Amino acid sequence: MRVLNRKALTCLGLSVFALTASAEGVLERVTKGGPFVIAHREASIPFSYMNAGKPVGYAMDLCLRIAEVVRAKTGAKNMPVQFMVVPPPIAWK
């Protein structure tokens, strides 16, 4: 269980860092009518995985909450949210 908690905290920390590092660009794009893009993996249970063709998981819940905050901050009531599947990293041998 501790390993899972460490992975979750690491993932959350990296997500927050990435969000703050690129928040200005995202806010500008959304204000201009652009989409809020959420990248995810197809099978990173429990963080993100596909269920009935829709991405779900802890990370998806967090990202959708962030999208709500961005929507409120920018006033973009019709902000589209797009999901983008990213491939797993290449295993180095």
Image: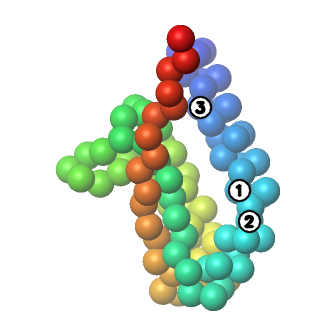
Mark 2 lies on a secondary structure that is: helix
Rendered image: mark on residue 19 = 1
Provide the residue designation for mark 3.
8
As displayed, is residue 68 above or below residue 45?
A: below
Rendered image: mark on residue 23 = 2
Q: Residue furthest front?
A: 93
* Residue 63 in sight: yes
Residue contact between numbered discs 3 and 2, judged by CB atoms under 8 Å: no
Q: Position of residue 8 (x, y in %)?
A: 59, 31
Which residue is found at the position 63% from the left and 70% from the top? 69
What is the crowding at mark 1: few (fewer than 14 residues within 10 Å), some, or many (at least 20)?
some
Could you give the CA–CA distance between mark 2 and mark 1, rounded to whole angstroms?
Answer: 5 Å
Does residue 33 appear left or right of residue 87 in this picture? right
Decide which of tag 3 and tag 1 comes sooner along the chain: 3
Decide which of tag 3 and tag 2 comes sooner along the chain: 3
Residue contact between numbered discs 3 and 1, judged by CB atoms under 8 Å: no
Say which quarter of the image contains residue 43.
Answer: top left
Amino acid carrying label 2: it is: Ala
Amino acid carrying label 1: it is: Leu
Q: Position of residue 3 (x, y in %)?
A: 58, 16
Which residue is found at the position 71% from the left and 80% from the top? 28
Rendered image: mark on residue 93 = none
Could you give the CA–CA distance between mark 3 and mark 1, rounded to whole angstroms?
Answer: 16 Å
Viewer-side label of 3, 2: 2
Does residue 23 appear left or right of residue 6 in this picture? right
Residue contact between numbered discs 2 and 1, judged by CB atoms under 8 Å: yes
Q: Position of residue 35 (x, y in %)?
A: 52, 75
What is the crowding at mark 3: few (fewer than 14 residues within 10 Å), some, or many (at least 20)?
some
Say which quarter of the image contains residue 20.
Answer: bottom right
Mark 3 lies on a secondary structure that is: helix
Q: Pick the residue in front: 92 or 17.
A: 92
